[in-house]
Amino acid sequence: MRRPVALRLQAALGTLALAAAAGVVLTMPETASAAAGGATGYATQNGGTTGGAGGQTVRATTGTAIHEALCGRASSSTPIVIEVEGTINHGNTSKVSGDSCNTAADKIELKQVSNITIVGVGNGAVFDQLGIHIRESSNIVIQNVTVRNVKKSGSPTSNGGDAIGMESDVRNVWVDHTTLEASGGESEGYDGLFDMKDNTQYVTLSYSTLRNSGRGGLIGSSESDRSNGYVTFHHNLYENIDSRAPLLRGGIAHMYNNHYKSLNESGINSRAGAKAKVDNNYFEDSKDVLGTFYTDQAGTWQVSGNIYDNVTWSEPGEDNNPAGPDPQSNTTVSIPYSFTLDDASCVPSVVSATAGANKGLKVSDGSCTPQSPDPTDPTDPDPTDPDPTDPTDPDPTDPPSGTNLSLGAGSDGSSKASGTSYGNVRDGDLGTYWSPAGTTGSISVKWSSATTVAKINVREAAGSEGTVGSYRVVDHDTGAVLASGSGAGVIGFSPVSLEKITFEITGASGTPRIAEFETYAG
C-alpha cells in the first residue's frame, strides 16, 4: 500500500542523481534574515501569533545550537528569534538541559515553551531526517525551512515520523514558506508531514509545499480526539500525496487557494463531525479530493469557487462518502478573520511562485500576482497604526483612566501560595499581594452583574518586577481569550461585558507576586 508515492518519486531521484554525476551544484537564493510579514488565518486569533518578535536574535548551524539558544533564555517564555542556516541532522543535534527548555537528541524539541521563531536564512535551512516537535507550547513561528525524510521506522527515526508534529495543549502556531517532504509512504517508514492532535488549536500553514508522502497530515489522532481545530491552510502545494490532505477529525478548518496535484487515494477527509470550508482551490489529476473516507462517522464541508481538473470520484459506500462528482455544501462555516481570495484559475501559477522554502517569502494579495515582502522600515509607520501626530489616538498600553473597577469587586483563582490572599489584588494596596502555589496560575476579578472592561493593569509587588512571563487574559464567562503576550503591565483589548475576568500566568521566571489586578472600562 502507499506505493504510488514511491513509484512517482523514482523519476525525481533519477534526475537528482544525473545532476550529481554531472557535477551540478544546486544553490538556493539568499533569503530574508528574519520572518517577514505577519501571521494569517486562524493563527491571528486567540491573541495572535508573533513568535519571538522583539526578542534576541541568534544564529544556529546545528540542532544542538538551536537547543542551546532555547536553554539560554532567561525563562521558557522569553522571546527569541533563531536564524538557522545549513543542514540540521542527528549527527549535530544533542539534548541540552536548562530551566527554560526541555529538549531531546532525536528531534528539534519545542516543549513547554513559548514565544519562539525558527527561520531559515542565508543559503537555506534543511532539517534532514529530523522532525520538529511542538508540545505544550504556544506562540511559535516556523518559516523558510525544509524538513525532509523523517521516519517512524527504519533508521534513523525521529518525531514519530512526522516532519512537523504538534500535540498536547498547543496554541497559536504559524508555519510559513516551508517545504515538507518524504520519500514514500508508511511501508517505507514515513508518517505525516503536518500533524496536530490532543488539543492543538489556532494554527496556520501557508505558502508551503508538501510532497512525496503517503500522508499529508491530520487534525486529531482518532475519532474521539476532537479537541483540535481552528486551522487554516492557504496557498500550499500538495503534490504526490496518497491521502490526508488533510484528515480532519472534529473541529473547523479553512482551506483556500491551495493547489492539490496528484492526490492518489483521497484528499480533504472531513470526518467525525468536522467542518471544512473549502474556497477557490485548484484540484488537479487527483482522486476523491473531498469527502468522508474510511469511516462511517461523517464530517461536513462548505465549498465555493473550486476548480476540479481531471478529478475522479469513487462510488459512495458504507465507509465512503465522496463529495463529488458535483461537490455541494452541506454545512456553513463562519470565518472570524479577513482574507482575500485569488481566483482559482490562477492558483497553480501563484502557488508555484510562492510556496515552499527559499522562494523569497513571496506572497499573494489576491491579484494573482506574487508579491515580494516589503523591507521593514522602522521609520515608516504602518498605515494601520494610529496617527502619531494625533494625540486623541488611544494606545492600549497608555495608563488607564477612570475608576479601578476591581475596588469593591470579588476575586478568586487557582491555588495560592501560603500567606497570600486573592483579595490582595483588589485592595488598592501595593504592599500586599497574591502568589500562585507555583510559577503559574490564575487570578480572577468578578462582579455580581455584567461589567464592561477594556483595559487591565497587572502590577507586580516591589522586588518581583519582571517575573511574569507569558500570560492570557480570559473572559471567564465564555472562555474567550481577550489578549495574550508576555510581561505584566497595562493590557488593552476590545471592550467586553462580563461578570468575571481572569489573568492566567502561563510562564514565569519565578513565583509571581501580583500586588494589584486593576480593571478599567477604558
Image: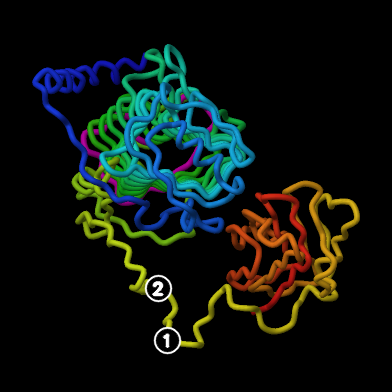
Residues marked 2 and 1 touching at CB (< 8 Å): no
Q: Who is closer to the viewer here, 368 or 474?
A: 474
Apparent side of residue 237 relative to residue 516 in the rendered image (left or right): left
Q: Is residue 84 highlighted in magenta?
A: no
**Magenta-tinted stretch:** 287-313
Between discs 2 and 1, the one toward the N terminus: 2
User: Residue 148, located in which quarter of the rendered image?
Assistant: top left
Q: Is residue 303 highlighted in magenta?
A: yes
As drawn, the residue found furthest toward the left would be 22
To which residue does mark 2 refer? 384
User: How far apart in space, not on screen, are marks 2 and 1 (Cα)?
Assistant: 14 Å
Q: Position of residue 473 (x, y in %)?
A: 66, 60
As drawn, the residue found furthest toward the right would be 419
Q: Position of residue 304 (x, y in %)?
A: 34, 51
State which quarter of the image contains the N terminus: top left
Apparent side of residue 146 relative to residue 22 in the rendered image (left or right): right
Vertical arrangement, residue 381 with respect to residue 469, above or below: below
Q: Position of residue 352 (x, y in %)?
A: 21, 43
Vertical arrangement, residue 286 with respect to residue 394, above or below: above
Q: Who is closer to the viewer here, 497 or 426?
A: 426
To which residue does mark 1 refer? 389
Please name the amino acid that badge 1 sits on.
Thr
State which quarter of the image contains the C terminus: bottom right
